[in-house]
């Protein structure tokens, strides 16, 4: 209602904006009369105008893991990238160098920053600062800094293991191994919850785990499980959780037996097909059905 009042010309197109926000709104005559070939471009235009109304001031908008972004979102962000030169907005869009998702187009509004590994001296200094409350020998800190390869997260994982053991004998050799080791430290029932959650991808709602009850995987009965697993997830609006580290989600997913993984993907696909609507759901559905 507020949008319609401030921009009456947008009122007939609010159902298109609702699609981007995943809100169910009955189509207006204008939307129903819109040719399918023009639907995507009109949606982009309306959402951009909606953002201009709702974010009039300077803003930093962070979008994580853009290599996992679905096609519809990537297309809109590409559209927006070329049209934000008059807005006081800064989009920070980190991604891995490989994979699909969103790749920023070459444009005057785009600045690419390639993150390099920490220099050896900086890695050692970071190890010293992070372990200053623990009496680790200098040789252990040097070994941790060297093995981290300049990765701050891997360095933290190595430090955690070194603090537990007091030595370097059992340090993991890779970030993937460190993620697996973190899972191995969980109680078996908690680890099973994390593995099932990884089937949804990086983001999920805890209530969605109840979907697996029909294939013999009931939701966690202990409400405190999410408190115990708090260090693994970011809390997001509306109760959703997101893996803090994609590598941890990958390691949890890889630990599922193939047959169980296919069963769980099949459950997710069937449930999403009933609950999701519109072409924006096609990418997610096809992924789960393919894996099933």
Image: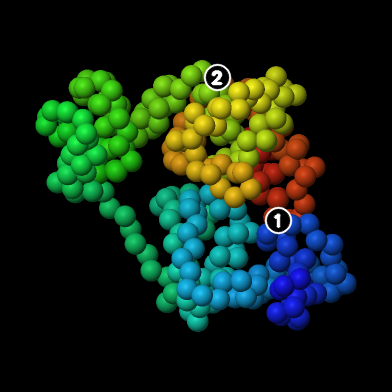
Q: Residues within 10 Å of mark 2 (few under 14, many from 20)?
A: few
Whole-Å distance between the Cαs marked 2 and 1?
33 Å
Provide the secondary structure element on which disc 1 rests: loop
Residue at image location 71% in from the left, 56% down from the top:
22
Callout count: 2
Q: Position of residue 183 (x, y in %)?
A: 44, 26
Q: In the image, is residue 242 above or below residue 173? A: below
Q: Residue 79 carries which label?
A: none
Q: Residue 22 carries which label?
A: 1
Q: Position of residue 224 (x, y in %)?
A: 56, 27
244 and 134: which one is in front?
A: 134
Q: Give the mark, 2 or 1, whose residue is nearer the N terminus.
A: 1
Q: Name the residue under label 2.
A: 189
Provide the secondary structure element on which disc 2 rests: helix
Q: In the image, is residue 68 above or below residue 113? A: above
Residue at image location 35% in from the left, 35% down from the top:
175
- 136 on left or right of 16: left
Residue found at the far left of this picture: 138
Residue at image location 66% in from the left, 26% down from the top:
219
- 261 on left or right of 155: right
Q: In the image, is residue 107 above or below residue 282? A: below
């Amino acid at each position: 209602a507020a949008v319609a009042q401030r921009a009456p010309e947008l009122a007939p197109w609010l159902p298109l904006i609702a699609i981007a926000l995943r809100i169910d709104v009955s189509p207006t005559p204008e939307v129903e009369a819109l040719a399918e070939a023009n639907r995507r471009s009109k949606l982009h235009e309306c959402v951009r105008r909606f953002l201009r109304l709702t974010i009039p001031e300077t803003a930093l908008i962070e979008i994580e893991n853009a290599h996992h972004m679905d096609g519809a979102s990537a297309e809109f962000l590409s559209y927006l990238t070329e049209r934000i030169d008059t807005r006081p907005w800064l989009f920070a869009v980190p991604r891995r160098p490989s994979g699909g998702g969103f790749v920023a187009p070459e444009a005057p509004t785009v600045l690419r920053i390639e993150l390099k590994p920490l220099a050896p001296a900086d890695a050692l200094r970071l190890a010293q600062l992070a372990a200053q409350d623990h009496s680790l020998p200098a040789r252990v800190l040097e070994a941790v800094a060297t093995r981290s390869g300049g990765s701050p997260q891997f360095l933290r994982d190595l430090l955690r293991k070194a603090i537990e053991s007091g030595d370097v004998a059992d340090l993991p050799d890779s970030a993937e191994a460190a993620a697996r080791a973190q899972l191995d430290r969980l109680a078996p029932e908690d680890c099973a919850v994390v593995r099932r959650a990884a089937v949804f991808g990086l983001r999920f709602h805890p209530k969605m785990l109840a979907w697996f009850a029909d294939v013999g995987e009931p939701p966690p009965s202990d409400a405190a499980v999410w408190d115990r697993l708090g260090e693994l997830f970011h809390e997001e609006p509306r109760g959703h959780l997101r893996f803090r580290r994609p590598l941890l989600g990958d390691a949890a997913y890889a630990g599922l037996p193939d047959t169980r993984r296919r069963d769980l993907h099949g459950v997710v696909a069937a449930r999403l097909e009933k609950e999701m609507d519109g072409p924006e759901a096609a990418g997610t559905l096809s992924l789960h059905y393919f894996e099933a």
